Image (tube, rainbow, N blue to C red):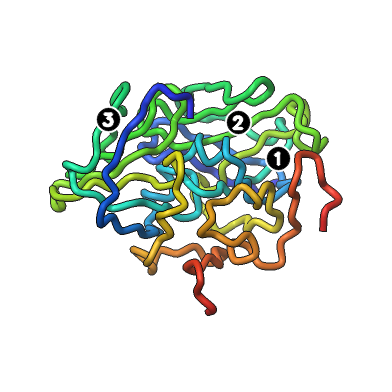
Amino acid sequence: MCGAVRYAIDDVGAVANYCHCRSCRMATGGPVAAFVDLKPGAFAWTRDPATHYASSPGVRRGFCATCGTALTYEADDTPDEVHVMSPTLDDSTPFAPSGFFHEEERLAWLHLRLSGATT
Amino acid sequence: MTEHHDGGCLCGDVRYRVSAQPVIQCYCCCATCRGASGAAAIPWIAVPNSGYAITKGEPVTFQSSDTVIRQFCGRCGTALNYRNTDYPDQRFQTDTLVAVASSSLDDIEAFPPNEVFHGDELPSWIDPENLCPGAKHHHGQGDDQSP
């Protein structure tokens, strides 16, 4: 949010999803996290890089140390993926999530459904 | 109230206790909350200042606008609280209320949101009515009479 950390993505073929897991909720402050799945080569820090925190063994979450914005998720067991918190994109319009991860951890009071879904 | 609710950040460096009943249970979908969190909307509970205390650690403070102070954990980034000295909705005045990011409560299910602020600033792929059916919506700052 403060602008200290910036990034650029190549969104060709990118897929967007939500994640309900507790770590994603806490890391972002949201009731659910929304992110874009990218190949590592399709993502680059363009100003200061993020600060990283290992929220689980083999997991690195990037955030801005100045203002706290949650930015990325990377895991050793999926080395060919970088997940970018899509609400931090200057324009997240093209990235409507298409699915939910960890549905079993969904908050009881979160009624959110996919865009365009009728149930 | 004698009941209290504890919470803290993802890494555990910062812990807090809420010992007052929330005055407001809401989502805020404004661009600043989105920017501060990385989430499309933040669920907040607003409680009297006297009913909120940091019990472990020292959060980082960031001034996100002229009258707004936000705190988060410097080690893991978890959003923790929000104070505003000049929010037009008088309930948010800093001398009375502090907003606590309820996603960081140990019992996150305790206080379901029933109001939505700035739903018009959500990403295009989230419908405010879909996010929180039946909620009271506030579309402008201080517009606390909106249906």
Which of the two discs, 2 and 3, sits closer to the camera?
3
Q: SS for tag 1?
A: strand
Q: SS for tag 2?
A: strand
Q: How many marks?
A: 3
Identified at 74% across, 55% down, the residue is B137
Check the image and name the residue furthest to the bottom. Answer: A119
Separation (CA) of disc 2 from disc 1:
11 Å
Q: What's the residue type where badge 3 is placed?
A: Trp
Report the chain holding disc 1. Answer: B
Is disc 1 surrounded by few (<14), some (14 to 19) or many (20+) residues within 10 Å?
many
Which of the two discs, 2 and 1, sits closer to the camera?
1
Where is mark 1, residue-wise?
B47
Separation (CA) of disc 3 from disc 1:
38 Å
Asked if the residue under mark 3 is in contact with the one under mark 2, i.e. CB atoms within 8 Å, the reply is no
Sequence-first tag of 2 and 1? 1
Where is mark 2, residue-wise?
B53
Identified at 34% across, 64% down, the residue is A102
